Image: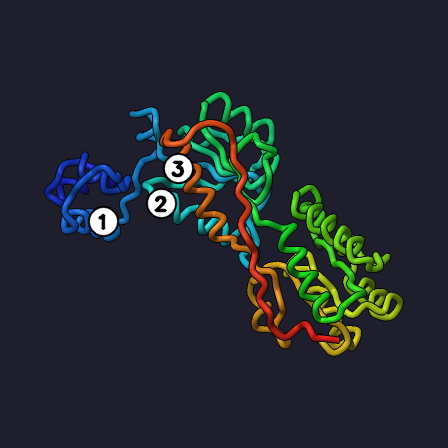
Amino acid sequence: MKLTLKGIARECGVSPATVSRVLRNDESFRVSPEIREKVLETVRRTGYQPDFAARSLRSSKSRMVCICGLKSMPHPLGVYSSMIDGTVSELQSHGYEALLDFSSNSVNESAYGMKFDGIISLDSDPSEGVQSYIRRNDIPCVVLSGSSEKKFDSVSADDPAALATAMDFLYSRGHRRVAYAGTMFDHQQDHICVEERFECFNKYLLNKNMDRLDVSRKTLYDAVEFLHGAIVREKVSAVLAFDHFSGLEVYRAAMLLGFKIPEDFSLISFNDVYPVARLVPAFTVMAVPAEEMGKLAARRLVLRMKGEISGAAEEFRLTESLIVRDSVKSI
């Protein structure tokens, strides 16, 4: 027999309304810590799961948020996992739950049997299907890890500033011939950070009167070919990698070609994600504040869903941190 909210209430000796408001983390509801813990402990022990579809039918609010915009599960060692963790934990702290939808083209409410109160889009340009759902249901949306061109609130990393910081660090260590190793993944080509980082890299070279090298590309197709050309033909002293995946491919290529880091060339990448800090040498990185970005996006969405803010969309760009380790040397 399926356990119901009334069953939880009966076991705890409280009303169903009390159980409901404890589970929703209703900030306006005052209840003793003992009662709150008793309800939560009973829920944990029994494995009770709220029926969000039924809740949606009973009221105009489901307290459910749809996270969409990716076509597949995020890589467990990528920044999206941390972003989603931050988003979900922050939503839950405000009494909301989240559903991850990887169809990317639309929000399939009929499949879930409920309406969502808000959308977190991991696509900087939400599909027409997602935007249609937002308009039809008059709900807010926040774009995470991208710019929405002022259609919706957006939260992203400040890549132009981070790229300048990384290049300033290399420049201060005497590096004047720097190659850029772009993204490894074709499906990322349309993401704003791919274009933005590469464009800012080239602008930096121009501003500092540094040579733009033929091996530098927005996409890294063959790391061995890239690194051989960079070291042997272009005589580079440093490589800046689009992210840790590209950095790891350059690291592997160096091992295959017999080059040593940082003796033969220095390496710096974006993303402080495992295993870059555990390698020998450990990577110097620009760390993206992924979890903080997720939390800020969730807080912004909650404010919109509650009607506590209104008006024009706002853009938030969070600062990335330079973490200096062993993969860069002075020349």
Foreground pick, 86 / 318: 318
Q: Quadrant of residue 126?
A: top right
Q: Quadrant of residue 130?
A: top right
Q: Position of residue 89 (x, y in %)?
A: 39, 49
Residue occupying the far left of the picture: 13
Foreground pick, 299 / 16: 299
- In terms of sequence position, does the residue under pointer 3 or pointer 1 come before the other? 1
CA–CA distance in space, label 3 to label 1: 23 Å
Under circle 2, the secondary element is helix
Foreground pick, 121 / 51: 121
**Callouts 3 and 2 close, C-beta under 8 Å:** no
For residue 302, which numbered disc appears in the image? Answer: 3
Residue occupying the point 47% across, 34% down: 119
Q: Position of residue 87 (x, y in %)?
A: 44, 46
CA–CA distance in space, label 1 to label 2: 14 Å
Does 49 sit above or below residue 56?
below
Q: Which residue is mark 1?
A: 40
Q: Nearer the viewer, mark 3 or mark 1?
A: 3
> Residue 59 vs residue 70: left or right?
left
Foreground pick, 303 / 4: 303
Give the residue type at disc 2.
Gln
For residue 92, which numbered disc appears in the image? Answer: 2
Q: Nearer the viewer, mark 1 or mark 2?
A: 2
> Residue 136 vs residue 165: left or right?
left
Under circle 1, the secondary element is helix
Residue occupying the far right of the picture: 233
